[in-house]
Image (tube, rainbow, N blue to C red):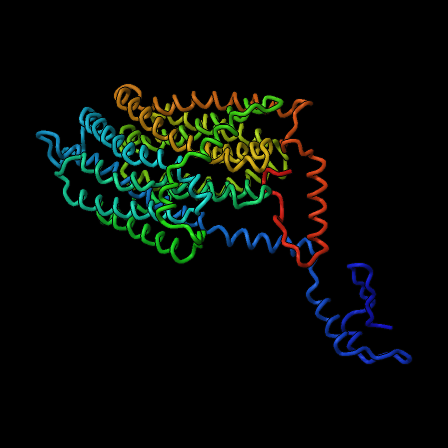
């Protein structure tokens, strides 16, 4: 009769629409009960394939869990506002404190005076950065391990409080332009001893590694990278506009306000890990333990078949070179454009923000086209990114006219994909139980690298400012040749016939594949099952 449903296993087959079920019965047919009619109508109106429901559910859950990434974006904005403003403040103070130099001459300095004050400001700026990076780099070795056990909320809150104290000190320094340049070094100390950006990044990165499924881990790393890549230029843009209208002090006030917002966000929105039965004394005593760090070293260095250890070490070196390159360009770029093109803080922040917006718009389509459309290898993705960075730095280092600087930004548009392919590839050649320990060790290494980058770029810039101020960028592009060679080597190894993409300590891929298919089948047919992922990430195939 119309309106009946047949059940075969877990599949329901409707022989008529819900309307026919609810309509008057045909002659000789038994009238269906109202409950059957309502059930049929609900089933018809709300039918969604289980796979679609699964994807929607996990996608929504993934987006809702991007709380730390949103925090990281705002935190990096506040950090970059303070960074670029301090660089310009040091230039102003260095000029005003030169003997027999008036404010008029500082506004239009000669080339000889410009080189002298930029060299002095760059030296003090190096000390300021080292005060922030050295303590935080050491702390980052312990933060990742401690956060894995007790949660990342406390280290992040400590870094936020340190940033707020740093802004207060910078406000006091900016109110007295005749004070010593080295007061800015002391003002940066609270940010360094509290962990700063390095420890925040290590905590967020560690949390993403252990809390995200392997299928979504690459996508998680992408959002972390975007938060950092966008936070710096957006913060610089805001600082440039505020400085143009009101000066130095309001910029630091805005940075402090953003830090306050980060503090409230961490307290109210982010749920920290509960540690019942654990005292504050016990947690503090275990902060400086190196167990996980040592395990990370052992995991990275242990012998593996098919040159696995060599590949992992080369990928670590490549990541460090990429981070070194980013820090090198960031620390001296403002002084470079000031020397070459006499740009103001506002113009520099505007141009940097424009490049960042272009990269943001382009990064997603580039990743989708390369991974989903052309289905390129993970390491091919990284090769494209590193090549783009090489072209950008080389062109920027040779820039003697503004159009060359703009061209360098266009050439570097694909640089953001370099780290995505590396993290995705390493996740495939290392077992899942090892990946958290290894990435914790990697994070510690990458936290130390910026110190070397700042020292190198500052000293090279000071030595070549009169003859070749773009030397730091050219050197960075040369170092990227090493990264490019490492990627090509690992790519050739991955394409060999004997290469096995997964290492599961004796557990065969076939067994893992059967388990995954069995779990997927259960998730589709069992309404109470909780899926672990909804879709493959950009580099997954």
Rendered position, 260 above or below 450: below
Q: Residue at x 50, y 26 (%)?
A: 387
Left or right of 397, for residue 183: left
Left or right of 384, for residue 39: right
Query: The N terminus lies in which quarter of the figure?
Result: bottom right
Query: The C terminus lies in which quarter of the figure?
Result: top right
Q: Residue at x 41, y 27 (%)?
A: 393
Residue 461, percent across and down? 29, 24
Rendered position, 494 above or below 92: above
Residue 299, percent across and down? 52, 29
Q: Can residue 229 be seen in this view?
A: no
Towards the viewer: 197 or 476 = 197
Left or right of 419, for residue 286: left
Give the tally of numbered discs. 0
Q: Within the image, what quadrant is residue 491 found in?
A: top right
Q: Which residue is drawn at 12% across and 30% down?
A: 98
């Amino acid at each position: 009769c119309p309106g009946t449903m047949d059940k075969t296993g877990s599949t329901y087959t409707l022989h008529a629409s819900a309307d026919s079920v609810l309509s008057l019965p045909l002659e000789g047919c038994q009238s269906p009960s109202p409950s059957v009619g309502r059930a049929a109508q609900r089933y018809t109106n709300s039918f969604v394939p289980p796979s679609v429901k699964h994807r929607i559910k996990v996608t929504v859950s993934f987006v809702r869990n991007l709380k730390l990434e949103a925090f990281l974006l705002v935190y990096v904005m506040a950090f970059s506002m303070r960074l670029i403003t301090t660089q310009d403040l040091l230039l102003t103070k260095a000029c005003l404190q030169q003997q027999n130099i008036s404010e008029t001459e500082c506004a239009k300095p000669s080339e000889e005076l410009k080189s002298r004050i930029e060299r002095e400001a760059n030296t003090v700026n190096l000390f300021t950065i080292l005060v922030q990076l050295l303590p935080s780099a050491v702390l980052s070795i312990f933060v990742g391990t401690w956060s894995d056990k007790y949660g990342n909320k406390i280290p992040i809150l400590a870094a936020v409080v340190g940033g707020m104290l740093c802004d207060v000190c910078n406000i006091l320094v900016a109110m007295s332009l005749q004070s010593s340049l080295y007061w800015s070094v002391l003002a940066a100390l609270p940010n360094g001893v509290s962990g700063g950006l390095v420890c925040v990044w290590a905590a967020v990165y560690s949390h993403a590694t252990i809390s995200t499924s392997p299928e979504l881990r690459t996508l998680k790393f992408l959002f972390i990278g975007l938060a950092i890549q966008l936070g710096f230029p957006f913060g610089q843009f805001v600082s440039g506009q505020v400085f143009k209208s009101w000066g130095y002090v309001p910029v630091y006030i805005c940075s402090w306000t953003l830090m306050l917002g980060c503090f409230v966000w961490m307290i109210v929105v982010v749920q920290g890990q509960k540690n019942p039965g654990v005292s504050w004394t016990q947690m503090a005593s275990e902060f400086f333990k190196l167990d996980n760090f040592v395990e990370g070293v052992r995991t990275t260095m242990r012998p593996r078949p098919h040159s696995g250890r060599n590949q992992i070490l080369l990928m670590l070196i490549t990541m460090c070179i990429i981070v070194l390159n980013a820090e090198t360009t960031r620390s001296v770029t403002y002084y470079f454009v000031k020397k070459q093109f006499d740009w103001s803080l506002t113009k520099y922040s505007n141009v940097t923000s424009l490049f960042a917006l272009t990269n943001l718009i382009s990064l997603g389509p580039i990743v989708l086209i390369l991974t989903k459309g052309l289905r390129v290898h993970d390491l091919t993705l990284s090769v494209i990114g590193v090549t783009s960075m090489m072209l950008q730095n080389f062109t920027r280092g040779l820039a003697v006219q503004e159009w060359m600087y703009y061209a360098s930004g266009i050439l570097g548009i694909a640089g953001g994909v370099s780290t995505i392919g590396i993290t995705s590839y390493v996740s495939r050649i290392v077992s899942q139980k090892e990946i958290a320990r290894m990435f914790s060790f990697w994070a510690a290494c990458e936290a130390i690298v910026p110190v070397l980058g700042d020292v190198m770029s500052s000293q090279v810039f000071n030595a070549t400012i009169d003859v070749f101020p773009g030397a730091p960028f050219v050197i960075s592009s040369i170092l990227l040749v090493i990264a490019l060679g490492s990627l090509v080597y690992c790519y050739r190894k991955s394409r060999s016939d004997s290469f096995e993409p997964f290492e599961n300590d004796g557990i065969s891929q076939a067994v893992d594949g059967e388990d995954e298919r069995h779990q997927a089948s259960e998730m589709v047919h069992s309404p109470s099952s909780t899926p672990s992922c909804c879709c493959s990430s950009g580099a997954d195939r």
